[in-house]
Image (spheres, helix red, strand yellow):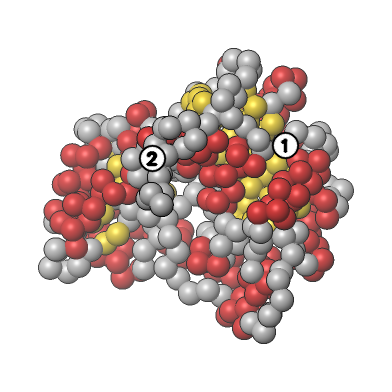
Amino acid sequence: MGAVSSRHLSGEPLSDRLPVFPWDRLEPYKATAAAHADGIVDLSVGTPVDPVPALVRQALTDAADSPGYPTVWGTAALRDALTGWAAERLGARGLAHTNVLPVVGSKELVAWLPTQLGLGAGDKVAYPRLAYPTYEVGARLAGAEPVVYDEPTELDPAGLKLLWLNSPSNPTGRVLSVDELRRTVAWAREHGVLLFSDECYVELGWEADPVSVLHPDVCGGSYDGIVAVHSLSKRSNLAGYRSAFLVGDATVLGDLLQIRKHGGMMVAAPVQAATVAALGDTAHVAEQRARYARRRTALRTAFEAAGFRIEHSEASLYLWATRDEPCWDTVGDLAKRGILVAPGEFYGAAGERFVRIAFTATDERVEAAVRRLQD
């Protein structure tokens, strides 16, 4: 029996359908930064570094004796928590359990959504020109055509099946206004395009108050053709738990539920219990926001004093910064100071003169970065 091939049935190597994994290109700069006498300050990835809230850990522990298979749709308690949170936090009205669906982290959902929707050759998936790379990856995994936009309502709707919004934006931190959201929802409905809105940073508005696509001022109280994506990774430090969920069109979520049942895509039972606890508490969210606010202020002040210009960045966990030079030059210079940031090119060619600076580092590491920028 011959070796298993990595080729698709078409004969095309699967790897050829995907872009180069961007973070591999950052490894030499990470090595340079790690060689700094005082150690690396890693501001390149938006991964939480602060403790998981105690009440969440307790809920996880209490549910640890879960020998049976969890359900893909989640427990009734979880669905109650999802609908309740979306109503209170997003202003979404009249939600039923059919309007929510837990998923195994938002990245999994983004990467496999086009495939689960049955998209393929001849179909188009659109996303912002500056965007999280997994939108493109998801389109390519399905064999669909990725399309970037500056203004979604100016897209050619021919063949367009899925439209991604991202507000607050990763990487820029830009927040779409109610008018922009409303206009895009109306356009998508007019042209029969399914709209998914990635709102994973909605709890992290600094100079703007992010509004969900599910708010009645945006969607008119109807969830037809729209779904919002939310995550507990940022608001509750649960990136390691892989807890996220969808809210919106019951027909779309019902179809995804059936597909995910067949695929065994289920959130672990202890994580479901932990999610209920996290969504039922706001104190830990306020505490984490305060941490990030302090770090954001310290880093913004230091980078601006060091000659950087910050654009957008009114929300999310990042500063979108430039010195009006090629991004890799900036990355290299900062790496020599022991500071690692993400090149803007990772998020599209339009970011080639920017870097993304995460403020997901400990207070001690943020203070170290500030000192180094002052040297």
- Residue 20 image point, x, y percent: 33, 40
Tell me if label 2 and label 1 are in contact, CB under 8 Å.
no
**Which residue in the protein does label 1 denote?**
226
What residue is at 22 percent from the left and 39 percent from the top? 328
Circle 1 — which element? strand
Please count the marks in the image: 2
Circle 2 — which element? helix
Q: Is residue 146 visible?
A: yes
Q: Amino acid at mark 1?
A: Ile
What residue is at 47 percent from the left and 37 percent from the top? 8
Q: Is residue 349 above or below residue 113?
A: above
The answer to whether residue 152 is left or right of residue 321 is right
Residue 15, label in figure: 2
Q: Is residue 314 above or below residue 359?
A: above
Packing grade of label 2 (10 A; few <14, some 14-19, many >=20) is few
Q: Nearer the viewer, mark 2 or mark 1?
A: 2
Q: Which of the two labelled residues, at mark 2 and mark 1, occupies the earlier sequence position?
A: 2
- Quarter residue 233 falls in: bottom right
Give the CA distance from mark 2 to mark 1: 31 Å
Q: Is residue 211 visible?
A: no
